Image: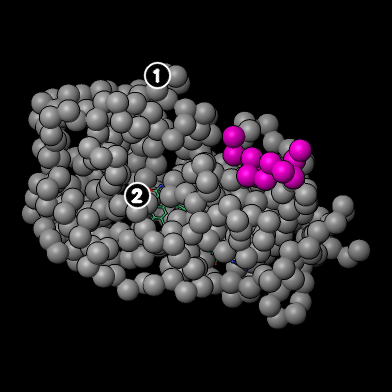
Amino acid sequence: MRRDADVVVVGLGAMGSMALWRLAERGVAAIGVDRFDPPHDRGSSHGESRLFRTAYAEGTSYVPLLREAWRLWRELEASGDVELLTQTGALMVGPRDGVLISGTLASARDHALEHELLDVRAASLRWPQHVLVDGDHVLFEPMAGVLRPEACISTALARARSLGATTRTHTRATVIESDDDSTCVRLEDGSAIRARHAIVAAGAWTGTLLPELAPYLRVERQTTAWFTVDDPRAFSPERFPVFVRELADGRLRYGVPAIDGQTIKIAVHHEGADADPDDLDRTVVERDVVPLEEYATTMLRGVRVPAVRHIVCMYTNTPDEHLLVGPLPARPRVTMAGGCTGHSFKFAPVLGDVAADIATHGTTERDIAALTVDRLLPERVA
Ligand SMILES: Cc1cc2nc3c(=O)[nH]c(=O)nc-3n(C[C@H](O)[C@H](O)[C@H](O)COP(=O)(O)OP(=O)(O)OC[C@H]3O[C@@H](n4cnc5c(N)ncnc54)[C@H](O)[C@@H]3O)c2cc1C
């Protein structure tokens, strides 16, 4: 059968743009398609910033992938002329036995990552912008920072194109078919792209393209806001590390310094309503803003309310909140890359590289045992 490419990548957001870049670096003939024109604000990769952390409360086994991701972000950065990853360090704040501090500390110790654990007094002297309360502990890790998601995606696509990859934007894939030898991506205009392998990185739309995964993915609406501050220098990337905070009841908030020189960003992790990516409510209402403004006024000093800007974005949650990468058990010529769950952007180049490994060699040397698709589909694996 005639093939249009070796590998077709469906979706060119965070995961897909990185997969296309990593395929192009290998010299693999690859075509990428996207229903919009990435980077765009319709999916899960907009909003100007994403946290990068290496000491990882979500699982100590992520640390080797994070080290690789750091290296790949720097490699991508070197291919363009825009700063993609600004090292600010990260503050994790919360109860000593909460999931955030205990998990971050465990991963830092397991992997001998540089870190400092501070009590309220010491941390308040160093970062007076944060209101700390009795019982809080603060963990600082220097190998953390802010990624610029839109620039990351543009740079990866530009690099992939310069190496020979082709892209088709404003092109929606409707169905992905595959047999033992090949895969066929059918497009909305009635045409099709035939390749040896398909990588599906469709973010919140994954369930539509891969119906076998739909029951396991929950799309969640998320709101983020930007606030002006009394003294922008005190909130600069040099003086105000990215932060994640676990409140006494376990809820999580996070924030980004004033990378624009004016405003800081604050967000709630989870607590959003179920969403339909084709009918996402982008109107920000009071109940979206209240927890963000409450955080700005009670947990930070020198932050002005109301917020000056908001956006709505989407998480695509897996049941165990771990990422998703690997071939579909019943369709080995189709590889899934994503499973956002609100923390996947930082991994995008390494997940893209893993997907490129699988698409070209059928396997990867990286340890992705906890992230593969078959964990969601146990009945299909038995
Ligand atoms: C508010 C918010 C804050 C976050 N903060 C962080 C953070 O601080 N750190 C972190 O590491 N992660 C964070 N994340 C998670 C991270 O940003 C996302 O997991 C990641 O960007 C998702 O990338 P993706 O490639 O899966 O999806 P997307 O980037 O949305 O890409 C999917 C692409 O597929 C395309 N597509 C969909 N369907 C089709 C189709 N049928 N045909 C063709 N194209 C299609 C879409 O147009 C889109 O371009 C955050 C997420 C959100 C929403």
Residue designated by label 1:
109
Query: Mark 1 packing: few (<14 Cα in 10 Å), some, or many (20+)?
Result: some
Please state if 4 lies on the left or on the right of 68 as rendered: right
Please state if 127 lies on the left or on the right of 151 as rendered: left
Residue designated by label 2:
269
Q: Residue 334's spot in the image, x, y percent?
A: 73, 53
Taking the magenta stretch, the answer to whether it contains residue 76 is no
Residue depicted at 26% across the width and 54% down the height: 265
Label number found at residue 301: none
Residue 310 appears in the rendering: yes
Q: How many marks?
A: 2
Please state if 129 lies on the left or on the right of 3 as rendered: left
Q: Residue 263's spot in the image, x, y percent?
A: 20, 57
| Highlighted range, magenta | 370-382
* Magenta-colored segment: predominant secondary structure: helix
The quarter of the displayed image where residue 244 is located = top left
Q: Residue 78's spot in the image, x, y percent?
A: 48, 45
Q: Residue 155's spot in the image, x, y percent?
A: 50, 56
Q: Earlier in the sequence, mark 2 or mark 1?
A: 1
Residue depicted at 39% across the width and 37% down the height: 53
Mark 2 falls on what kind of element?
strand
Residue type of the residue flagged with mark 1: Arg
Residue 21 appears in the rendering: no
Query: Mark 2 packing: few (<14 Cα in 10 Å), some, or many (20+)?
Result: many
38 versus 299 height, above or below: below
261 versus 128 height, above or below: below
Foreground pick, 295 / 42: 295
- Quadrant of the snapshot with the N terminus: bottom right
